[in-house]
Each structure stands twice: as structure tokens, then as C-alpha cells.
């Protein structure tokens, strides 16, 4: 038995062996031969680089994009206005004991702004009751939620649903625009 000497070295199982062939068209063709003997042909090889980082006992190491998330609490968002002294005309309205009319509800529903939740808390609604109405009418907007909550207040608590209590809740919650709408209609 004759022995043939080569400069080949054995490769580990599963590794690929790179064989380069010269093509008559001056294109280099690379063939990878794996241990199972199957051939994979590829065109020009791509240059792939691999970076390995070893990080030990470090804090605040970040790889990739930087993303910033800002989370605000309700108090951080906006400083509250200082309560403005109540004018005489508004003070008269807060003492009004007449039953809340549907026309008044229609008038102010679109003038109640960002403090609408505080208005209904002042009218003794729980956060769960407010959330339920918001869930039911969220597609229609805040004006519809305010309208539905005021109708609910009028229907379920007719003794409490007075113009004076509504004006007081609106004013103390910072919804002076809605109070001005009521004043202009009187």
C-alpha cells in the first residue's frame, strides 16, 4: 500500500472546508465542502466580520439603538392654576337650587375640558363609575362622556342634580369656560 503525502490537515466534524477554483472567465468561485461530502457553491465570498466583546462587572453598558421613554405622573404634566376668586355672578349661580336642565347639559358638554374627571369626582362619582362611562363612550369623545355622566347624575340623583352644585363643581375643578357658557345663557 502506497502512502500519499499531502499538506492537508483534518478539520473538525461539522466544519466547512473552503476550496477556491480559478474560473476561465476570471471570476473566482468558492466551494465549501462540509464533512458529509456535499458541495455548496457560492459566487464571490462576502466579507463578514464578527466582533466579540467580553464585558465583566459593568453597569449601564448599552449596545444598539438608544431609546428614551418619558413617563409623567399627573402632577408633573401641568402646574395647576391658582383658584381665581369667584365673581359675584358665579357665586349667585352656586346658590341656585333649580333642577339641572337638559338644555344646560347640551350647552356645556363641549366646553368642559381636561379637568372633566375632577368635575365628576366633585359630584361624588367614583373613579370606577367615571372609567365605565369613558369605556362605553370613548369613541364619541369627551363631550359625549360628559353628557352621559351629567344625564346619569340627573336621573339617578335628582335631589342633588341642581344647577348650583354643577356650577360649584365646574368652578372648583378649573372649568371656568363652562361656567361662563352657563352665565351667558342666563
Image (spheres, rainbow, N blue to C red):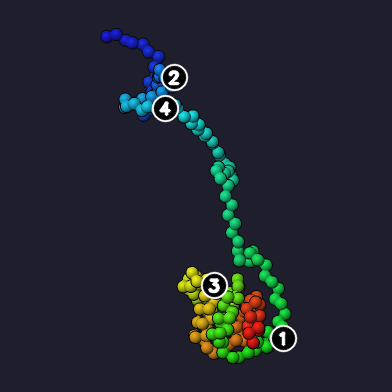
Residue at which label 1 appears = 88
Cα distance between the residues tagged 2 and 1:
97 Å
The residue mark sitting in front, 4 or 2, is: 2
**Quarter of the figure with residue 162:** bottom right
Which element type, helix, strand or loop, lies under badge 4?
Answer: loop
CA–CA distance between discs 4 and 1? Answer: 88 Å
- Residue linked to disc 2: 26
Circle 3 residue? 142
Residue corresponding to mark 4: 43
Q: Residue at x 66, y 77 (%)?
A: 176
Residue at the front extreme of this rendering: 25
Say whether residue 3 is left or right of residue 97: left
Q: How far is mark 3 from mark 4, CA to CA?
A: 63 Å
Q: Are marks 1 and 3 in contact (CB under 8 Å)?
A: no
Residue 61 visible in the displayed image: yes
**Front position in the image: 174 or 113:** 113
Q: Residue at x 60, y 57 (%)?
A: 70
Report how far apart the C-alphas of labels 2 and 3 lie in the structure.
73 Å
| Above/below status of 74 relative to 32 | below
Whether residues under marks 2 and 1 lie with C-beta atoms below 8 angstroms apart, the answer is no
Which numbered disc, 2 or 3, marks the residue closer to the eye?
2
Q: Which mark is first along the chain, 1 or 4?
A: 4
Give the x, y percent position of residue 8.
Answer: 39, 17
* Foreground pick, 158 / 52: 158
Spatial CA distance of label 4 from label 2 is 12 Å
Q: Neighbour class for label 1 at 10 Å: few (<14), some, many (≥20)?
A: few
Amino acid at each position: 500500500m502506497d502512502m500519499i503525502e499531502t499538506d492537508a490537515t483534518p478539520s473538525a466534524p461539522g466544519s466547512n472546508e473552503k476550496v477556491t477554483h480559478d474560473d476561465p472567465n476570471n471570476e473566482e468561485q468558492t466551494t465549501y465542502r462540509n464533512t458529509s461530502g456535499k458541495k455548496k457553491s457560492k459566487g464571490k465570498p462576502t466579507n463578514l466580520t464578527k466582533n466579540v466583546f467580553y464585558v465583566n462587572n459593568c453597569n449601564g453598558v448599552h449596545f444598539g439603538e438608544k431609546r428614551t421613554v418619558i413617563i409623567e405622573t399627573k402632577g408633573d404634566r401641568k402646574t395647576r392654576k391658582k383658584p381665581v376668586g369667584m365673581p359675584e355672578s358665579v357665586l349667585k349661580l352656586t346658590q341656585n337650587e333649580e333642577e339641572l336642565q337638559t338644555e344646560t347639559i347640551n350647552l356645556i358638554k363641549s366646553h368642559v375640558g381636561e379637568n372633566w374627571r375632577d368635575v365628576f369626582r366633585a359630584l361624588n362619582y367614583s373613579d370606577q363609575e367615571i372609567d365605565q362611562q369613558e369605556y362605553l363612550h370613548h369613541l364619541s369623545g369627551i363631550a359625549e362622556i360628559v353628557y352621559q355622566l351629567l344625564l346619569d347624575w340627573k336621573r339617578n340623583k335628582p335631589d342633588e342634580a341642581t344647577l348650583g352644585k354643577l356650577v360649584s363643581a365646574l368652578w372648583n375643578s378649573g372649568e371656568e369656560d363652562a361656567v361662563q357658557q352657563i352665565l351667558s345663557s342666563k
